[in-house]
Amino acid sequence: MIFRGYTGKFLLVDLSKKAIKTIEWNKEDWLPFIGGRGFGAKIIWEMTDKSTEPLSPNNVVAINAGPLTGTHIPGAGRVSITSISPLTNIWADSSMGGYFGAEMKHAGYDVIILKGANKEPKYLSIEDDDIELKKADELWGRDTYKTESMLKKDLGDNVRIMCIGPAGENLVKFASINHEFGRQSGRTGIGAIFGAKKLKAITVRGTKDVKVADLLRLNKRIDYTIDFMRNNDKDWHEIFLRHGTMTTYEWCQSISALPTKNFKETEFEKWNESDGFSMEKRIKVGKKACHCCTSPCGNISKVQHNNQNNFIVGPDYETAGLLGPNCGIEDIESIAQANYLCDIYGLDTISTGNVIGFAMECYENGLLGTDGLKLEWGNATAMMQLIEMIAYRQGIGNILAEGVKKAAEYIENGSEMFTMHVKGLEQSAYETRGAPGMTLAYATSDVGAHHSRSTIISWEIKNTDRFSVSEEKVEKQIELEHQRSLFDALGTCRFQWCELRLPLNIFAQFFRAVTGLRTSLESLLVASERIFNLTRMINVRRGITKKDDIPPKRVFMEEIPSGELKGRKMQYEGFKAMISWYYDLRGWDQETGIPTRETLEKLGLSFVL
Amino acid sequence: MKIKTIPELCTSCNMCAYICSIKKLGVINYRKAAIRIFNKLPYPEIEILSNCDLCKSEEEPWCDKYCFPGALYMEGKE
Ligand code: SF4
Ligand code: SF4
């Protein structure tokens, strides 16, 4: 069959057997899952089981491009990387910008699937149909910048790379995968799986054309898109171009949702020392975009490290919020430096900011011996040191490298109260005691407390009584879970829609122009629902039930101590009502939270029964 | 006339190269373009190849037209 948009092929690499093969996938089985995260979910469902150990050779990693990936649609360079997470022991999925997905498509693959493990450090080299596992002894132990530089020196500047740093090698449970000196697949610790598989990097060079069904129509839609984004709201476009996601920083402070001192507080006194304007004035030197993106959110900032000038693509809002206010850090320079350390060691900045905030709160309460390290709020020097200790698992770094949930089980003495996570995944940078919708969004997200499934907070604050609990909010949340997830299935960035307000229907038009299929937006959204239910079933198979759909304890048990929302906390009754509406609307069982047979059959997921 | 570059403004988006391959050859393949971007920090390297014909049938070269950050411009043109 002739594919357009898709390459029609998976690359399957068995590291243990050193066996490499390509698989042609068939339309009937796979198209209902669109691509990207959807393909990744089906692969993880089929190739892992309820007892697959995340760091064992049995675990599988799928690097999934989508049907739009590799075309010149702005931001269509993405991959979703999927697996079973070493941090949460459930479904793992982290989307990564940059150029890697596009390069995979040029090389001829929709998905790269990895299983087994190398005995010695290796990297996987893909040059179109030429695939080879190559020695990585020289690279092992190197940081991500050095690794990429060495590989580019060897293979040429025009190769695309993803790699891990020391944190991944040392099996830090929230290790990231890094790409092109500044893009990461950060969440859920897939870097540690690479480490366990002794896979230091993947390099790709593809020379094939990306084939689309109707190039003329696609060009027209892209022209419309670019024009729309630039002219729809010029002021907003300009500020988004200047600050990227750092625009969220000021907003979160203004609505009292800025994670401050391990999410204890929700406003930060010195916020304007580390917001987008401070970044712009003090450290920013340029802009960086993903594949064909005409509204780049990436800021290039300069960083001082070991008395040398270095550069990062960052900080972005999540990083700044969590490595900044959440640890009491006041200045943008320190935040950027911590960002740099996380990038070179290969650590997820969101989890790292949580873990350090957690450690600081334990320290404040005398629960954590730190061998003389003064882990006081705002102590940037101690923070830098701790990041290194985590990456290399030194001293308390070894405990913290397990993530907040496991660390608290070890530390005990009530430290669990300081763990901000859902299902083991540390929370991203929105505090939710003043936003019940967002509380629910974290609780029901399939990977744990991450905002990428539904960031309903902005909608609920703008359009509703923010503190209210209502079925309307739950409905909206489910709608967002399907809309936002669609982008990871299509393999393109969602900011053009959710930040720059491009109508959602354009992406269905893109899909049709690229694939030649006559799929409506509605059926794409049903596919997104199908994917969401499949990842739920992966979790259910691994023991997740209603009891796990629960926000961090602090949200119910501690009032916000200061600021605009002083005295607020989430009411348990309200949460219970929302989760009940949620299960109802989703067709999940009220008692267990498991999708009903009827729901699964309706979505064409009978194969999981 | 020729295309001049300002690497400090280039975001490494690669749109110029993609659009060049589409304009020149009707295919989506940045490696077949007459312009190449090498992503570096802080700023990329931009290379214009000798087969660039400045899109002579068009009012302006497409790479320039699609480079919104303004990293490309035509020498001798306002
Ligand atoms: S908006 Fe940001 S994340 Fe999205 S494609 Fe552009 S640079 Fe990448
Ligand atoms: S279009 Fe402009 S900003 Fe983008 S890569 Fe080309 S020269 Fe750089």
Image (tube, rainbow, N blue to C red):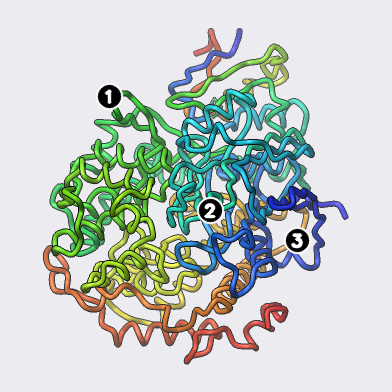
Q: Mark 2 = which residue?
A: A95
Relative vertical location of residue A168 with respect to residue A448 in this rendering, above or below: above
Where residue A456 sits: x, y (%)? 39, 66
Please give the chain letter of the residue carrying mark 1.
Answer: A
Which residue extends farthest bottom?
A: A591
Element type where label 2 sits in the image: strand
Helix, strand or loop status at disc 3 = loop
- The amino acid marked with disc number 2 is Ser
Badge nearest the viewer, 1 or 2: 1
Badge 2: chain ID: A
Residue A150 disc label? none
The residue where tag 3 is placed is: A518
On whether ligand 1 comes within 8 Å of the CB at mark 1, the answer is: no
First-in-chain label (3 vs 1): 1
Image point 46% across, 34% down: which residue?
A288
Q: Position of residue A586 (x, y in %)?
A: 53, 81
Task: State which quadrant residue A533 falls in.
Answer: bottom right
Q: Nearer the viewer, residue A197 or A384?
A: A197
State how far apart marks 3 and 2 are (Cα). 26 Å
The residue sitting at 59% across, 45% down in the picture is A199
Q: Nearer the viewer, mark 3 or mark 1?
A: 1
Few, some or many residues within 10 Å of mark 1 (<14, 14–19, 20+): few
User: Can you identify the residue that label 1 sits on?
Assistant: A307
Check if mark 3's residue and mark 1's residue have beta carbons within 8 Å: no
